[in-house]
Image (cartoon, grey):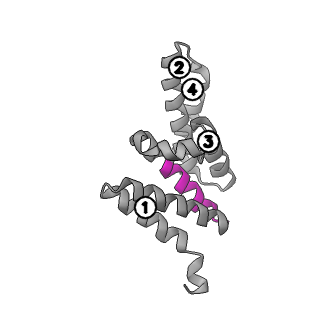
Amino acid sequence: MQSGARGLYQYALLNLSILHADFGCFPEAITAMQETIATARENHDMPCLNYSLSWLHQFGRKHPEEMTGIQKRGVLGSEKEALLFLKTKAKETNMWTLLSVGCQAWVYTEIFLACDACSSPVEDVLQSQCKSAHMVSLG
């Protein structure tokens, strides 16, 4: 591989992963996404890393049965830890749309967990939803 192309390799992997997922090849999509994440980390490419982690998080919500191997190895940590990491890094890199998606996912997670636990941190949930809506309007 040419030296200049190495810096873009993670984007080729990202597109490969999405292509696999679109065609229903979920194990291959996860493998390619894990390589995308590792390559983005190696190249210090925070936008690609943030997008890849966000994609993997959303993929896990849609296909939880496909994520058992990743969850056992602790690649993403708990759902709350992954969302906190995504929100923090998105804010640091001024990726406002991704931050908004992270806030919305956090709201969904809190509501879902609150329904299971029969208690509701309504104030925190609504505050996060308002912040998310405000960020979308800025972008």
* Amino acid residing under circle 1: Ser
Residue at disc 2, secondary structure: helix
Dot 2 or dot 4: first in sequence order is: 2
Q: Which residue is mark 1?
A: 17
- Please report the residue visible at 60 percent of the width from the left and 37 percent of the height from the top: 78
Residue at disc 4, secondary structure: helix
Q: Which mark is residue 125?
A: 4
Where does the magenta region start and end?
44-56
The mark lying in front, picked from 2 and 1, is 1
Q: Which residue is mark 2?
A: 114
Q: CA distance from mark 4 to mark 3?
A: 22 Å
Q: Are marks 2 and 4 in contact (CB under 8 Å)?
A: yes
Q: Position of residue 112 (x, y in %)?
A: 48, 25
Q: Are marks 3 and 2 in contact (CB under 8 Å)?
A: no
- Please report the residue visible at 53 percent of the width from the left and 56 percent of the height from the top: 52
Q: Which residue is mark 3?
A: 77
Dot 3 or dot 2: first in sequence order is: 3
Residue 128 vertical placement versus 40 (above, below): above
The mark lying in front, picked from 4 and 3, is 3
